[in-house]
Image (spheres, rainbow, N blue to C red):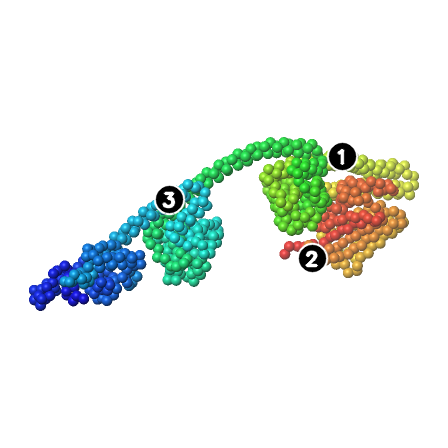
Amino acid sequence: MLAPTTAIATARGENVNIENLNQQPKIAQIHSCQELFDQAPAGYLITDQAGLVQEANQVAAHLFGVANGQLLGKSLAAFVAAESLDQFLLMLAQSQQDSAEQSAEICFVTPQGDLLHTILSINAVFDLTGQVAGLRWLIQDISDRKQTETQLQQQVEQGKWLGAIARRIRQSLNPQEILDATATATKSFFQADRVLISRARPNGDWVNVTEALESGWTSVLGFAVEKEWVTERLDVYQQKGAYTIHNIEQASLSPRSLELLHHYQIQALLSIPIIQDEQVLAFLSVHQCRSPRNWQMSEIDALQQLADHLATALHQSELYQQIQRLNADLEKEVQRRTIEVQRAVAFESMLKRITDKVRDSLDESQILETAVRELTLVLGLSGCNAALYDLDQGTSTIHYEYIDSIPAYQGRVAQMNHFPEIYSQLRQGYYFQFCSLSPNPVRGQVAMLACPIFVDSESSQGVEQVVLGDLWLINHKDYVFSEFEIRLVRQVANQCAIAIRQARLYQAAQVQVRELERLNRLKDEFLSTVSHELRTPISNVKMAIHMLRTATTEEKRQRYLEILDAESTREAELINDLLDLQRLEDACYPITFEVIRLQDWLPGITEPFHARTTVHDQILDVSYPSNLLPMVADPVVLRRILAELLNNACKYTVPAGEIYLKVSQESNLGLNLNSITVFTLRNRANIPHSELPHIFEKFYRVPNADPWKRGGTGLGLALVQKLVEQSGGTIKAESTDGWTSFTVRLPTQIQTEI
């Protein structure tokens, strides 16, 4: 074994004379060699033949990342990386046999675990006897150059990979094929355990649409990515363009995020957004599942470039898909237009046929029967019906129906307020189709189209819609009425409305013609009656005057004077009735209200009629309670009302027939009055129901109701009705089971404003 100084000198290639070692110049030279050895720019080591370090300069210690002196006694082979160990051992063996210098690239691993790439040179140091005294090692650090070479190599490989995948994904215009090819190539290049591509749903969530997976790991294809996960990392994407996790256990993650990554079996993550026109189309994510992974900038750059290529490919695919859709839409539009033209021709033909049939009639029933039949047959429906509205009663009644395969509903009456969601729309002129959620107990579950039949009507507020009824079309539950069918039904409904209005106008005109004929007949009868009634008293007056002139006795003269007085009074009353009726119609009849005690006042009214009924063998019964409240009324008017009703009853009651007059009072808080006084007059007489609506008309007389020919002008009941209304009351007539009754209701007290 050489002494250190000798070894150092020998390592410098000097010839050392041992005998001269104690000479001072040589010692100074040795110290100078030691200083050069320590301060050399490269690493120098002196080892024995087995490779144990005996000397190491400061550069060598620095390269290995240890303090100066810590290398001494260590085996240099222990620092050699596994991939360089065979080469190192070969150099060590050859150095024992050959003095020539050997060099090779050797990779060391520092105690800190870092790789040290070097050019390692070795040559043997021989002693004076020619034996190998030690080994001299020169270490040149080429880590930077190696890293540069590695980076260049990676860039070349990345360039080749990116070029290949770019060509591959651009060969396809199918988005899913592009995504699948990208995921597969990325997994292969990165030697990753999983590669995912996630895209957004319309609701904002993200879903894994493509996956390339190494066997042994759980597939997450089709899984939804929580929107919150993406939202929390948008800032990272916007600032850095990539989101990286080297080790999930060392990253600052929320418990929820950590749970999600564990669920995905992820140890390390690299994710890049795929952006087109500042919009995120998707996310490309690389997962390392078996262990953490330090993502290199070159890997991030490669994935970013791939994302750019993918964005371009997806954009081109989208443009192609848009063109394909536009072409398909254009073709569909041409087909649709062709069908529309054909349908329009068929529509006009069907509408003209139905319209002609509907307008051929002025009979409302025939119009609607034709409409529902033609719609059912033309459209192939299960059935169709037409209903008419009674807006005052709030009802809809199905009057006309044509059915093919459903139960009949004709005659069914629906209360509109029971189905407000339907009839509120129909009454506003809206049509709609629907299918009931719960099956109808008779028809089951069917699809229906409801369309209103309405006409425009002028009013003080302008033109408004008046709904006459509706059309209902019924078909099986899965049927959807097309726009063409809806348009046809609406047109038919409009034609029905026009035809119904014309039919009703015609019917109204016919009613007016009949009414005019009736009025003309009444006029003739009135003129005949009035002329007769007016002439009869005048004739009797003339006859009485003539007889008065020729009378020879005082008794005869007195009798003729009585006739003269009665007939003149009768004539005056007839004329007064006509005048009073005219004044009542003009609302200028004078009425003076007074307090009347009915208990004291009524006997004076009914007494003359007791005598009259006795003469005609009739029975008159007048009843009223003794506690009647005083009544505020015009006594003249009230007398005339009761007298006319009693006179009318006496005139038309058969002999031995009963006449009842009953007076009562009842409260009527609904009208805000203290009470109502009710006069009810019943007598044995019969008025046909068809004649009751006319008995209060002027000059009207019930046919065949005066077998005793007692006469009359037909003004009495008309005058009574006007007097009752003028007094603030009502009168009602009824006739049933051989009895006729008149009920007069008058306020007991007249309400005054406070």
The amino acid beneath tag 2 is Leu
Q: Tag 3, which secondary structure?
A: helix
Q: Which numbered marker is on residue 44?
A: none
Question: Which x, y percent locates residue 509?
Answer: 71, 35
Q: Tag 2, which secondary structure?
A: helix
Q: Earlier in the sequence, mark 2 or mark 1?
A: 1
Q: Of the residues tagged 3 and 2, which is closer to the observer? A: 3
The amino acid beneath tag 3 is Ala
Given residues 62 and 396, the one toward you in this image is 62
Left/right of residue 99 with respect to residue 703 in the rendered view: left
Residue shown at 61% from the left, 41% from the top: 481
Left/right of residue 727 with respect to residue 154 in the rendered view: right
Q: Which numbered marker is on residue 669?
A: 2
The residue where tag 1 is placed is 517
Q: Of the residues tagged 1 and 3, which is closer to the observer? A: 3
Question: Which x, y percent locates residue 459?
Answer: 62, 41
Query: What is the crowding at mark 2: few (fewer than 14 residues within 10 Å), some, or many (at least 20)?
Result: few
Q: Earlier in the sequence, mark 3 or mark 2?
A: 3
In what quadrant of the picture does the C terminus appear?
A: bottom right
Query: What is the crowding at mark 3: few (fewer than 14 residues within 10 Å), some, or many (at least 20)?
Result: few
Residue shown at 18% from the left, 62% from the top: 131
Q: Quadrant of residue 676?
A: bottom right
Residue 418 can be seen in this image: yes
Above or below 33: residue 657: above
